[in-house]
């Protein structure tokens, strides 16, 4: 675990705040003076996980850099719902790039700041899973390989949500999207395709790679803080449930992220220089059905005749994560 | 304004976009009734006082507690804590040790000499309180808080009722009892000892505006048992009563080496345990039904068994002789009632103590117009008033649920009703909020924290002395225990709603002031309500 858990203070470190804690141990989000880097009035759907994840992450980065931050933002929901010209929700210096070149734009900003002797100002690049794992992947890998001084944050909602829920290389098997319909002998997205970019980032041996979800705020903030302590290429991959694309209730966003972590579907870990340092262990293990059932994109698995063999394959993927990352080991 | 190349509009903020108009459901903060509070016969705001204890402010906690119950150190020892049986935390690990924290606060108050703040008003009214048991003490306390003068008339030489003349010292040390009564006297409650009221309407003439009756139930019920002249048959109330006067061991009641106790309630258990401590080699409880049907609490039965008391289930006493008794075995019929079997057994016994329940001495109520009794109980309405206006009653004399806690609750309720009566109004209790059920909470957020176990006196001392059996918590583990409370249904400022809102539509008002929704931007997603650990937010449909 990347932070010191607090025990027995009624809720320990599970809640956002805790009135019994000394101020220095409280989360950034608990502060009445937090930055609100992304402000009210944005046009994200009700219960948007991406809007929440972005505020969590960028507020933490602002806190860690004392407000000396520039953000480059790929095309995608995050850009579209936050910044319909001339309005913007961003309360940080922010630049919109294209769908696929954010990593390169951020590299350029970092280089320019260096040339202008403003190295104290730090750079964050951010985008969706489509912008990151598909179209922006070449720029991203280049940024890693050159060890450019950028923190790249991917908000993974497992599809091209902004254009109407199409499949991306981060869409999980069996999930229904507009381009992987729930029809035919193998309904939904096929097994055996796609990629897990955090593992690819790891293979670049860059200084810092971590995953997080919007269900574990303390963990997420600690990871951003750690990332900002380090210079060079850093990658943070945050799971952000999408009520629209996943077909979940707006109020279930955090619950879905929690279930993804507790079932082992989404491994939460932290690595430095290619080596995994810590994982956020599963606290109360659950079978994958608990995670799948509330989502309409998996509804075809739970008809009159449940597709037990497909569910078993998804369970096997979760089990592999648990083994691979040691998610059941005691913290 | 001069704009850069290709720019035609000023930069604007998304605050111009009032997303609150999207909402079909609105979140609202609520205070729900925690199950502990709902179950407390004294109407304590348990979650409320634990909130202060969690923060380490024990005095604030004690003051919040004593808003409803003036006897925390006593409660923390003798209360059967129905709050813990109702506590939502049972669904996670084990109930919060409410009773042990209450005792810690009560003891802390005695140690630090905390007093009740004097009441601000003085109504000029005088209320007579008959009996200084928990019902009378509670009524007098609450009447005093409300600005009335409360005068207790007590027949016995010392105050406390059954808390002194019934409950044994090994469960309630008398210095604790004395300290909490003394605090009430310092607060302004007047107690006239050795003052028996023999006619309540006459006593009222002495300048009183109303009366509260809390005379308890002290007359032992008898069962017909053929007994020889030389046999020794006693009653439990008398035995326990005599214990109080017994400053020296040889003044204690003579029970002999082999003592048989007849009955299955708490009193039977207490007498048997007392007999053991007085040196009886054998103390046997004879009860006509099974352990499951025994009115005594399971933990008391357990403690008695640990101390070497034996229990004969499904047995009745047929006759008592000089040095033995005859019992008959019983069997439960289809309806669960014990029926004689015709099978007999003799067991050696030097004395038999009957613990078959008590009736009230209602002699002081003869010829009170309108006052109704039924099966020895004085009948009262929802405001604890008898059929005679201005005459109120509570505690053991007015109900079948006979505990210290119920008596305290009756006293409080009666005091509020008397207050209304003295102002020419009728008392209407405030409406209760809906229950904070476990289903309304999000238990994910609570840390794993098993219950703290209280220290218990070693068994040798338990069998031979009247030292207190159950120990207390120290500050460290009392704090831990208090922090196990989940604050069911009431905001405890965990900042979750403030943190999880994707639209920054929750305003944090600062310590002690909770939060407020910003309906200009709240889209009504309901994440705050779903992630509120304690269930203090509800979603309600928008009107249009
Ligand atoms: C052995 C024993 C153990 C118990 N253990 C527990 C326990 O662990 N926990 C628990 O919650 N409950 C326990 N109880 C029950 C509890 O003690 C009673 O329910 C409670 O004390 C009732 O309170 P009360 O104020 O109604 O009456 P009491 O406590 O009986 O007080 C009545 C008072 O009125 C006085 N009085 C009576 N008539 C007159 C009169 N005419 N004039 C003036 N004064 C008068 C009496 O002297 C007495 O002091 C126990 C009872 C017994 C007998
Ligand atoms: C080069 C290019 N191709 C296609 C698009 C259309 N487009 C805009 S956003 C988007 C999908 C974004 O998906 P993702 O990056 O996962 O972000 P999300 O909206 O899911 O947060 C697409 C395909 C574009 N803007 N540019
Ligand atoms: S957890 Fe606290 S508020 Fe909830 S029932 Fe138990 S003591 Fe009462
Ligand atoms: Mg996406």
Image (spheres, coloured by chain):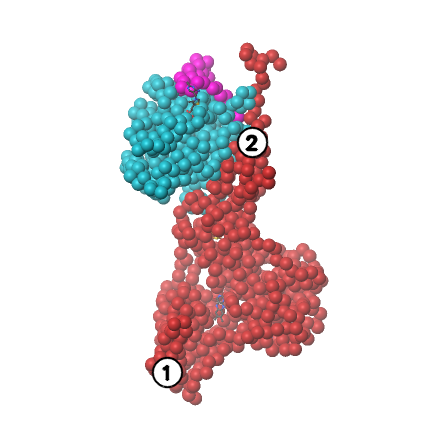
Between B107 and A138, the residue placed more toward the observer is A138
Give the quarter of the image for residue B336: bottom left
Between B180 and A136, the residue placed more toward the observer is A136
Q: What residue sits 38% from the left and 82% below the top?
A: B325
Q: What residue sits 47% from the left and 78% below the top?
A: B235
The range drawn in magenta is A89-118
Instruction: Identify the disc placed on residue B326.
Output: 1
User: Chain A: what color?
Assistant: cyan
Residue B350 counted in the magenta span: no
**Residue ID for mark 2:** B19
Q: Residues within 10 Å of mark 2 (few under 14, many from 20)?
A: many
**Please, which chain is the residue tagged with disc 1 on?**
B
In screen coordinates, is A307 left or right of B519? Answer: left
Q: What residue sits 55% from the left and 23% below the top?
A: A87
Earlier along the polypeptide chain: callout 1 or callout 2? 2
Q: What is the secondary structure assignment of the residue under circle 1? A: strand
The correct choice, above or below, for B465 with respect to B484 in the image is below
Q: Which chain is red?
A: B
Split into 4 quadrants, where in the image is the N terminus of chain B?
top right
Instruction: Identify the disc placed on residue B249.
Output: none
Q: Give coordinates of residue A311: x percent, y percent.
A: 32, 39
**Please, which chain is the residue tagged with disc 2 on?**
B
Q: Give coordinates of residue A250: x percent, y percent.
A: 47, 36
Dot 1 and dot 2 residues touching (CB under 8 Å): no
The correct choice, above or below, for B328 with respect to A145 in the image is below
Give the quarter of the image for residue B388: bottom right
Task: Evaluate whether residue B212 shows in this view.
Answer: no
Q: What is the secondary structure assignment of the residue under circle 2? A: helix
Q: Give coordinates of residue B50: x percent, y percent.
A: 51, 51
In screen coordinates, is A315 left or right of B260? Answer: left
């Amino acid at each position: 675990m990347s932070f010191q858990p607090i025990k027995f203070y009624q809720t320990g470190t599970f809640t956002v705040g805790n009135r019994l804690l000394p101020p220095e141990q409280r989360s950034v989000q608990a502060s009445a003076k937090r930055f609100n880097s992304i402000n009210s009035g944005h046009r994200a759907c009700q219960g948007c996980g991406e809007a929440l994840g972005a505020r969590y992450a960028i507020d933490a980065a602002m806190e860690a850099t004392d407000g000396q931050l520039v953000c480059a933002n790929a095309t995608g929901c995050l850009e579209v719902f936050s910044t319909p010209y001339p309005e913007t929700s961003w309360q940080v210096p922010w630049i919109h790039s294209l769908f696929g070149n954010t990593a390169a734009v951020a590299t350029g900003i970092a280089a320019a700041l260096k040339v202008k002797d403003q190295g104290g100002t730090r750079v964050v690049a951010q985008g969706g899973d489509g912008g990151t794992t598909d179209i922006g992947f070449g720029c991203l890998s280049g940024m890693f390989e050159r060890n450019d001084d950028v923190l790249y944050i991917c908000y993974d909602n497992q599809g091209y949500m902004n254009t109407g829920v199409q499949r991306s290389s981060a869409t999980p098997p069996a999930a229904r999207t507009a381009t992987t319909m729930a029809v035919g002998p193998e309904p939904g997205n096929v097994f055996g395709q796609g990629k897990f970019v955090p593992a690819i980032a790891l293979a670049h041996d860059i200084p810092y790679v971590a995953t997080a979800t919007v269900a574990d705020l303390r963990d997420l903030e600690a990871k951003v803080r750690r990332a900002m302590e380090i210079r060079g290429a850093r990658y943070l991959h945050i799971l952000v449930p999408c009520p629209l694309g996943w077909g979940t209730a707006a109020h279930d966003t955090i619950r879905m992220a929690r279930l993804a972590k507790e079932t082992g579907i989404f491994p939460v870990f932290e690595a430095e220089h290619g080596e995994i340092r810590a994982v956020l262990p599963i606290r109360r293990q659950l079978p994958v059905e608990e995670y799948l059932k509330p989502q309409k994109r998996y509804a075809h698995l739970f008809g009159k005749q449940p597709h037990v063999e497909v569910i078993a394959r998804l369970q096997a993927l979760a089990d592999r994560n648990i083994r691979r990352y040691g998610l059941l080991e005691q913290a | 304004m001069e704009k850069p190349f290709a720019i035609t509009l000023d930069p604007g903020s998304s605050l111009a976009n009032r997303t609150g108009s999207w909402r079909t459901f609105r979140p609202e903060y609520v205070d729900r009734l925690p199950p502990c509070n709902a179950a407390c016969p004294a109407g304590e705001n348990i979650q409320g006082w634990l909130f202060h204890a969690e923060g380490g402010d024990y005095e604030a906690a004690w003051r919040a507690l004593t808003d409803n119950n003036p006897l925390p150190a006593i409660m923390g020892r003798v209360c059967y804590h129905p709050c813990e049986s109702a506590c939502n935390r049972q669904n996670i690990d084990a109930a919060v040790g409410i009773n042990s924290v209450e005792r810690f606060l009560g003891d802390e108050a005695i140690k630090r000499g905390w007093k009740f703040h004097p009441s601000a008003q003085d109504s000029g009214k005088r209320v007579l309180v008959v009996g200084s048991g928990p019902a009378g003490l509670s009524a007098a306390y609450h009447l005093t808080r409300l600005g009335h003068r409360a005068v207790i008339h007590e027949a016995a030489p010392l105050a406390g009722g059954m808390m002194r003349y019934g409950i044994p010292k090994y469960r309630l040390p008398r210095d604790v009892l004395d300290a909490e009564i003394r605090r009430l006297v310092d607060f302004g409650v007047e107690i006239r000892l050795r003052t028996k009221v023999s006619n309540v309407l006459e006593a009222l003439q002495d300048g009183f505006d109303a009366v509260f009756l809390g005379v308890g139930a002290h007359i032992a019920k008898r069962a017909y048992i053929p007994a020889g002249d030389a046999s020794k048959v006693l009653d439990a109330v008398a035995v326990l009563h005599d214990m109080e006067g017994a400053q020296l061991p040889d003044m204690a009641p003579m029970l002999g080496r082999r003592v048989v106790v007849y009955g299955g309630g708490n009193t039977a258990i207490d007498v048997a345990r007392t007999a053991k401590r007085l040196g009886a080699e054998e103390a046997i409880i004879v009860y006509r039904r099974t352990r499951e049907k025994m009115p005594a609490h399971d933990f008391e039965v357990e403690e008695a068994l640990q101390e070497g008391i034996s229990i004969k289930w499904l047995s009745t006493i047929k006759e008592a002789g000089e040095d033995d008794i005859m019992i008959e075995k019983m069997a439960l019929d289809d309806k669960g009632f014990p029926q004689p079997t015709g099978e007999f057994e003799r067991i050696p016994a030097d004395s038999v103590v009957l613990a078959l329940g008590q009736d009230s001495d209602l002699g002081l109520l003869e010829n009170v117009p309108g006052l109704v009794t039924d099966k020895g109980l004085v009948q009262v309405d929802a405001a604890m008033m008898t059929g005679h206006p201005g005459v109120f009653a509570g505690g053991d004399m007015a109900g079948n649920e006979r505990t210290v806690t119920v008596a305290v609750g009756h006293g409080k309720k009666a005091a509020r009703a008397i207050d209304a009566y003295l102002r020419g109004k009728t008392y209407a209790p405030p409406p209760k909020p809906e229950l904070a059920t476990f289903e309304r909470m999000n238990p994910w957020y609570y840390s794993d924290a098993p219950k703290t176990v209280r220290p218990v006196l070693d068994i040798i001392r338990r069998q031979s002395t009247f030292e207190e059996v159950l120990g207390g918590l120290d500050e460290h583990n009392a704090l831990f225990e208090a922090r196990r409370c989940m604050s069911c249904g009431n905001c405890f400022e965990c900042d979750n709603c403030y943190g999880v809102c994707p639209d920054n539509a929750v305003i944090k008002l600062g310590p002690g002031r909770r939060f407020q929704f910003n309906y200009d931007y709240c889209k009504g997603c309901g994440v705050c309500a779903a992630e509120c650990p304690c269930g203090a937010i509800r979603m309600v449909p928008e009107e249009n």
